[in-house]
Image: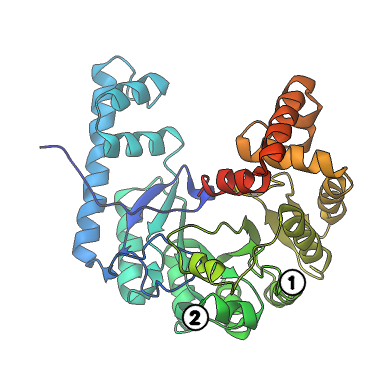
Amino acid sequence: MALSFEQGPIRPPSEAASLLLRLTRNCPWNKCAFCKTFKKETFSRRSVEEIKKDIDTIAEMCHLLKKISHENGFGGLLNRQMLVLVYESGDFQLFHVASWLYNGGKTVFLQDANSLVMKTSDVVEILNYLKERLPSVERITTYARSSTLNRRSVEELTALGRAGLSRIHVGMESGSDQVLKFIEKGATAQQHIEAGKRVKESGISLSEYIILGLGGKRWAREHELETAKVLNAIAPDFIRLRSLTVGKETPLSQKVHNGEFEEETEEGVVRGERLLIEHLDGIQSNLISDHSMNLLEEVNGKLPEDKPAMMAVIDRFLALPEREKQNFSLGKRWGIYRVLDDMLDSSQHDRVAAAVDVLEKKGTLAETISFLKNQVV
């Protein structure tokens, strides 16, 4: 019988090379208007024993992979030939572990949306067992909600850090109380600040996620300015940017349909991004656009030293003639462009320009760009 262990559906992009270990199933809040990931699922905690058995299975898979490597003349190494061999076997969980080992076997992400809702003592026990059975692990990260973190003392968080928890990813989304209430985030700006400060005080690395465009046209300026205030108060180690996409199966989609929410344009989102970065002051953070849903993925850097360079990328886009903005937006969403310099390839540029012409004549350019953007999620 094939070895298997339980995995959930999500992880941050920065954890692409990480081993995925499921502590909880789905999301205990599950009300955020922009999210569809767990809407039809019920939240549950897995038992410590279940999770330990999964860790044992993963350790057994590691030994099995080394055995297969020796049998095929690779000397126990996890090289590309081994990856191909495991992939072709059709055992995709074994392939996941093989890929993890190929990438160093050093990072683990604890799933699903809010693992720290479990008892702190249970999580500490799991972390200790994980490091005992998989000694190559150096970094362990997880998602957590601000409301959950505020129910944990600094001492509890410090204990998690000592046990091996390296980083906590928090979906702040916005620093505006108006926006947070509208999207049913279940947290206020002040609660985000308090939670962030607890994590920072514990010594665990903190990554805060912000959704560009989440204020729509109604709260565009407030969303960016209030978010900057909250980030300045927390000074997270990482600020990760995401751009809003309104999925058809989300409560936010219904709000759009009812006229309660009007989405920002691509240019409006970029102007909001500029306003946010402009007002980030007095903090040392890494600002990262590590998702292809962002129009300007090249806006990355360390604050404060890289702020001028990040602003320059945004200003370069905003200075483009309207026709060229449309060209880049369509080309980026189409997958032809990744960065602004990709427009310098005349053959690619002309190909996109021809598509812009056709779509404009049909009156479907904005609709097509929005459709392509939503396919990324």
Q: Position of residue 365 (x, y in %)?
A: 67, 43
- First in sequence: mark 1 or mark 2? 2
What kind of element bears circle 2? loop
Residue 250 occupies quadrant? bottom left
The amino acid type, in three-letter code, at marker 2 is Gly
Along the line of sight, which residue is nearer the eye, 209 or 169?
A: 209
Crowding near the residue tagged with mark 2, few <14, some 14–19, many ≥20 C-alpha atoms within 10 Å = some
What kind of element bears circle 1? helix
Q: Measuring 73% from the left and 44% from the top, which residue is drawn there?
A: 298
User: Disc 2 designates what residue?
Assistant: 186
Assess whether mark 2 and mark 1 are in contact (beta carbons under 8 angstroms): no
Q: Position of residue 160 (x, y in %)?
A: 43, 70
Along the line of sight, which residue is nearer the eye, 82 or 88?
A: 88
User: Disc 1 designates what residue?
Assistant: 228
**In the picture, which quadrant includes the N terminus?**
top left
Q: Position of residue 269 (x, y in %)?
A: 72, 58
Q: Position of residue 316 (x, y in %)?
A: 86, 45
Residue 88 as seen in the image, left or right of residue 318: left
Q: Measuring 62% from the left and 85% from the top, which residue is drawn there?
A: 190
Q: Is residue 198 visible?
A: no
